[in-house]
Amino acid sequence: ADLAPAVETDAVGGALRRLDAASKWTVVVLQTSAIVIRHDLATPYMVVGAIIAAYLTTLIKKLVNQRRPPGAPFADPGMPSSHALVSTFLAVAWVVQLDASPVGAAVLALAAAISVLRVVCGHHTWAQVIVGVLLGAPLAYAWMLLGSLYGVTEGGATAYAVMYSVYFVLSAVFIRRSLAKKKIMQPN
C-alpha cells in the first residue's frame, strides 16, 4: 500500500509540520519578491499559470476523488497533490525562463522539498505527490512554450498593464480562496 508516513509529534516532527504549513505562503512571498525585483512580464505570467494550475488541480481532485492517507488533517480529496503540482509548475517555469541556471536548480530542489514534506507530514501518499509532480512539469513547460509562441512576455505598456492586472486579480482571488479554505478546513 502507498501510505504516507505520519510525522512524529517530537520537536523535529513539529518543526517539519511548521515548515510544511509555511510552504504555500513562502512560495507566495518568493514569487511576489521576484515580481518586484525583476519587474518583467515573464514573472507574473508564471504566477498566472501557477494559479490556473492550482484551480485545474482542484477540478482534477473532484473528478478523481481519491482520499488522502488515513490520519490526514484535511477531508478534501488528495489526488493529485496541489502543493506538488504548483511548486513543480513554478520550478519548471523558472528553469525554462532562466535556461537551467543554478537558480533554477535551487528552485527545483525547493519544489522537491515541498513535495516530500506533503508525504512526511501525512497530507498525501507518494502516488498523490508523484502525480502532482508529473502533471506540474509538463503543464509549466507547455505554459511557457505558449507564452513564447505568442510573445506574451514581450511588449510595451499595454502588455504590462494587462499582465499585471491579470496577475493582481488572480492573486487576490487565490489568496482570498486560500484564506477562506484554511478557516473552513481547520482540524477539530
Image: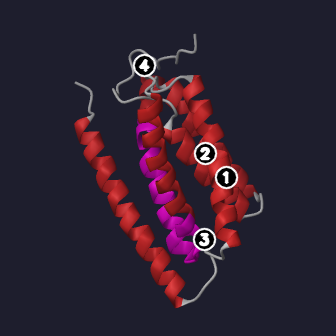
Tag 2, which secondary structure?
helix
Q: Which mark is residue 51?
A: none
- Tell me if label 2 and label 4 are in contact, CB under 8 Å: no
Q: Is residue 44 above or below residue 10?
A: below
Three-letter residue code for mark 1: Val
Q: Is residue 93 above or below residue 41?
A: above
Q: Which mark is residue 92?
A: 1
Residue where numbered disc 2 is placed: 136
Tag 1, which secondary structure?
helix
Which quadrant of the rendered structure holds the N terminus? top right
- Tell me if label 3 and label 4 are in contact, CB under 8 Å: no
Quarter of the image for residue 127 reads top right
The type of colouring in the image is secondary structure
The region drawn magenta spans 18-45
The verdict on residue 125 being magenta is no
Residue where numbered disc 4 is placed: 10
